[in-house]
Image (spheres, rainbow, N blue to C red):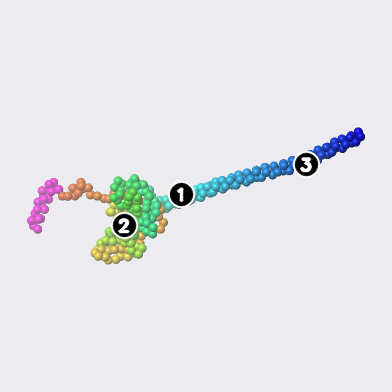
Amino acid sequence: MRYKILIFGIVFFVCILVLMEVDKSIQSKILNASDYIKIFFLDSKEGIANAYERHFDQAEQIQTLKQKVADYDKLTLEIQMLKSEILKLSNLIGKGGITHEDESIHLGRVISFATLGERDRIWLESNLSAYSQKAEQKIFGIVKDNVAIGVAVIENGRLEGFLNGNENCHYDVYIGQNRAMGIVSGSNKGYLVVDYIPDWIEIHKGDKVFTSGLDGIFLENIPVGVVENVRENYGYLSADVKPYGSLNELSYVWIIDRESPQLTSTDSQNLQPDSQNAPKETLENLNSQTMQD
């Protein structure tokens, strides 16, 4: 009986040991599965976080690169514009003739056409404070490549230009060697029209036209164009003039600001005969000639 109990105890102990070993194996497998699941979730979490960060980092980097490209494009355009401005200024100054500003010559830049489709009216940018005090009541000359191309006026604080051929563009000119006087006024089939030329002065095709300077707008002897045709009008001659100046590439121009020649009261008094101070012999001669007549 005692042996049976002993054998049972030994068998029971062995079973317990076997069960413990089996339990350890199961526990190890469960722990391994649990660790695998934990590692999977941790890796997934880190992968999602990294993907999220990469996505937004890439989006931020893309936005930064786009801004840099935009800045580069803008800088490239600004450099190109500066090169173009320098070239235009070089062309303006390198032609000889007018090469610098002074109290009566100012630099101006063409901003745009005043009206869409009207290419003989422009807006100009210039330092208006440099002009004479009565600038708003004056007419200025516009010169490009050392030839006259139009006139300008200040309108509501802006400088508006009327180019050759516009109905508001008028200035005095000389024509040919005889220096026949005329007035630029409008256009005819692509030519400038010069009206009010005295019909007793001969002008011919090929005669050169240049500013007279007597109108207080331009300096004297600035080229305008060449006579192509002469027509008789009512009591005067009209000439069609092919202009020297091209209106296709307008950029920088010279603005002529001149004071109109005026006769002062002192000058007018000097021109009038002073009978009180005249010599008696002169007065007597005048009286005797009058009586003889």
Residue 109, numbered label: none
What is the secondary structure assignment of the residue under circle 2? loop
- Residue wearing tag 1: 82
Residue 105 visible within the image = no
What is the secondary structure assignment of the residue under circle 3? helix
Amino acid type assigned to the residue bearing label 2 in the image: Asn
Query: Which residue is painted at 37% across and 48% down in the image?
Result: 126
Mark 2 and mark 3 residues within 8 Å of each other at the beta carbon: no
Front-lying residue, 65 or 212: 65
Q: Distance between the residues labelled 1 and 3?
A: 82 Å
| Residue 285 among those drawn in magenta | yes
| Position of residue 98 in the picture relative to residue 215 (left or right) | right
- Residue wearing tag 3: 26
Front-lying residue, 247 or 180: 247
The nearer-to-camera label among 2 and 3 is 3
Amino acid type assigned to the residue bearing label 1 in the image: Leu
The nearer-to-camera label among 2 and 1 is 2
Q: What stretch is highlighted in magenta?
A: 274-293
Mark 1 and mark 3 residues within 8 Å of each other at the beta carbon: no
The crowding category of the residue bearing disc 1, from other C-alpha atoms within 10 Å (few below 14, some 14 to 19, many at least 20), is few
